Amino acid sequence: MKKWLLVLGMITCMLGLTACGQEEEIKPLMTQEEADTLGRQVVETINQYVLLNAGDQVSDPVTLAAIDSWEAAAEDMGDYVEIIGVESELDEKDGVIDIRVKGSVREAIVEIVIDNNAITTISTNVEYTFGEKMEKAALNTLLGMGTVFCVLILISLIIGCFGFIPKIQAKFTKAPAKQEVKAAPAVPAVQASAPEEDLTDDLELVAVIAAAIAASEGASSADGFVVRSIRRAGNKWQRA
């Protein structure tokens, strides 16, 4: 009897532990069917706003951002054709709904983000093939490397010009050379000779000088002498 009671108690404990280990089932904020309907309604509404060009009539920032994202994606997606499928991940208050859309050129996914029972973001992302993604990556790489090399070449040219800048600056800022003014050679002063005395009127003095000269020459008469000028040298008179 005690053994049966012990076994019954163990079974009761095991059942109690199993009941405590079960988690309460989480109820999502909407069913998959409701999520599918909501996603289709959002896509159709955005497409109608774009077709009617009625974005100016919208005041909700989330809807405005959704319209801008759809128009930007339409350049690669092409014209809207149809909705291919809807997938969703939902919990009690949050969730994500992805609507796959077929365009005339490419497919796209419209992503609806729900946070705390409210739609916070609606964006359209174009689906590219693997080849297109690789091509874009290669172009972005070439563009980035080309930009870097262009900047390096420009910097090299600027550094190379540093050797010419001082010369150009010196050429424009150089003061004109002062012309040396050569002093004119000094003209030696000409000593003014004593003015010759005009003796034409002083006949007596001329006669005396002529007689003196004749006496010094041993002549008996001064008739052969002609006095043209008389210069004074010191205290003596000299004949010219």
Image: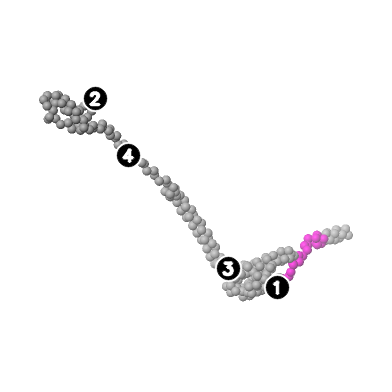
The dot on residue 184 is 4
Give the structural element (helix, strand or loop) at label 4. loop
Outermost residue toward the bottom in this view: 81
Residue mark closest to the camera, 3 vs 2? 2
Q: Nearer the viewer, residue 3 or 204?
A: 204
**Quadrant in the picture for residue 73:** bottom right
Q: Secondary structure at mark 2?
A: loop
Q: Are marks 1 and 3 in contact (CB under 8 Å)?
A: no
Q: Is residue 47 above or below residue 185?
A: below
The amino acid sitting under disc 1 is: Thr
Name the spot of residue 104 as percent of width and height, x first: 58, 74
Q: Is residue 28 magenta?
A: yes
Q: Which mark is residue 235?
A: 2
**Residue that appears at 65% across and 70% down:** 56
Image quarter of residue 66: bottom right
On the question of residue 1 being in view, the answer is yes
Hey, what amino acid is under mark 2? Asn
Q: Is residue 70 shown left or right of residue 153?
A: right
Q: Amino acid at mark 3?
A: Tyr
**Discs 3/4, front:** 4
Q: Residues within 10 Å of mark 4 (few under 14, many from 20)?
A: few
The numbered mark at residue 37 is 1
- Dot in front, 4 or 2: 2
Q: CA distance from mark 1 to mark 2?
A: 151 Å
Dot placed on the residue nearer the N-terminal end, 1 or 2? 1
Q: Is residue 195 left or right of residue 85?
A: left
Q: Nearer the viewer, residue 211 or 50?
A: 211
Of the image marks 3 and 4, the number of the one nearer the N terminus:
3
- In the displayed structure, does residue 49 sit left or right of residue 22? left
Q: Which residues are magenta?
A: 14-32
Label 1 element class: helix
Residue 63 coordinates in the image, percent (x, y): 67, 68
